[in-house]
Image (cartoon, grey):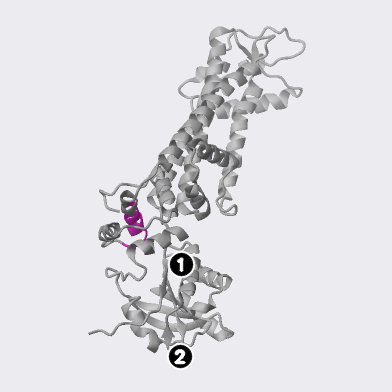
Amino acid sequence: MSEKSPRWTLESLVDFEQAAATSIATPPTLRSAVNNAIRGQQGATARRYGLRVWLAGMPRGQAGKKFLSALALVTVGLSLTLFFTGISSVVALMDRRSGSINVVQFLAIFLGGQWLVLLLAAIAWAFRRRAAEGFSGVQALFGKLACRLAGNADNRWWQAIMEGGGMAREALLWRLARMAQTAGMAFNLGILCGLLGLVMVKQLDFYWESTTRVAMRSILDQTVNVISAPWAAWYPDAVPDAAMIEATRRLPARPPVLPPNAAPWWEFLLLATLFWGLLPRAILGLLAWRAERKALANLAFQGRTHRTLWREITGADRIETDEKPLDGVLVLDVGGSGLNEETLRPFLLRRLRVHPAAWKSVAVLDPGAEHEAALCLADAPAGIVLLAEGWALSPPRMRDLHGRIRATAGAEILVKFLVANVTTSGQPTAASSEERHEWERFVDGLRDPAAEIHFYETLQPVL
């Protein structure tokens, strides 16, 4: 993308999806401006730049601005709620009779609970592919609440992002994840404020108790050493030693008056909340912010609506004059159409700008032909042309073939679907408009940045 071109933001992405979902035709002057702007650029870079130019020239609504304002309102409301929840939780944990706090319960509830949530979130993130990159329950709640507060009666952009997937969906997911971490930071700030408030206005004591003396004492001693590792070297006063741990154990036979010097415990709990509660949330929020920016910078615009719009802007039959011819292309005749290299060579050279090095048949009842095609795929061809008849579209079969090609040849190999029908004399002819529509929907649905659809047309004689 040009250095002077504006970058994509979540607001502009929402506005784009809303504009792309409408049926407003692109003015000819804007189409010309987009084609001039992307001259010399290819692939996803051309789409990101060209569609940004297109959005700037189209009537722009307020869907993105309203949605982000609603997101900010939800974030503030949730953060305030969790902030006061953190304060009230610390106050509720204090034993009002003795004015003391059980340190084991504090660590288990406020730190252990948060890390359990983070662990479950990490497991869900690791298996996000199996869940089709679905929203978590919290993210879905944030998104729906923000959409309702935005007051947009027409939320076609939300459906487009939800169903389209890809980097657009990831960008929205990361923004909602950042909101969740902001709310988590507010909760930890509430814990810190609640604990500091009690320390300032009360003679606060700390204790722990357990039926098993040795086991719990050993666990608590090790836990303190692990948690205090970030500051033990430069602030040892905030690390309860073995004597302090033993002295603050509550026993039935011991008087209820606890040691007056409780500073090591409350300082330890403050720093523990800071380092193991607030800081991880801040780091995760920063990582979510960077991931969102990365997703927005790598938008591929490969959704069905995006590809249809791109063809409408640039011209369905536009020839990429700046695209270099490809030599060593493998042509795979799906189902054995009967078309041969001799009849299609002029079209392949002039319109697809490819030079076939091999011509094989696939999806035929011939194990030998399938084996030969697999060997050619393994040889890493410069590109692949999938030749198919317009009437013979079988989505499951073609999707399986596309998956095998990607698994064998890789994700970067250029794949060009060439659709043509065959006359009774064995000559290629153009597909019908209905067949073109179905093939375009199928290829667009693959969401493959390195795949495109082409249709055979009779070439004009070269003068």
Image coords of residue 276 (percent x, y): 53, 30
In the rendered image, which residue does mark 2 sit on? Answer: 426
Region rendered in magenta: 42-52
Residue 83 lies in the magenta-colored region: no
**Quarter of the rendering containing residue 27:** bottom left
Q: Earlier in the sequence, mark 2 or mark 1?
A: 1
**Quarter of the rendering containing residue 227:** top right
The residue sitting at 40% across, 50% down in the picture is: 16
The residue sitting at 47% across, 69% down in the picture is: 437
Residue type at tag 1: Gly
Q: Is residue 115 left or right of residue 291?
A: right
Q: Nearer the viewer, residue 116 or 223?
A: 116
User: Would residue 273 be seen by someone viewing this image from the given angle?
Assistant: no
Tell me whether the residue at label 2 lies in contact with that at label 1, contact meaning CB atoms closer than 8 angstroms.
Answer: no
Name the quadrant of the C terminus.
bottom left
In the rendered image, which residue does mark 1 sit on? Answer: 410
**Quarter of the rendering containing residue 364:** bottom right
Image coords of residue 29 (percent x, y): 27, 58
User: Would residue 206 be seen by someone viewing this image from the given angle?
Assistant: yes
Image coords of residue 341 (percent x, y): 40, 86
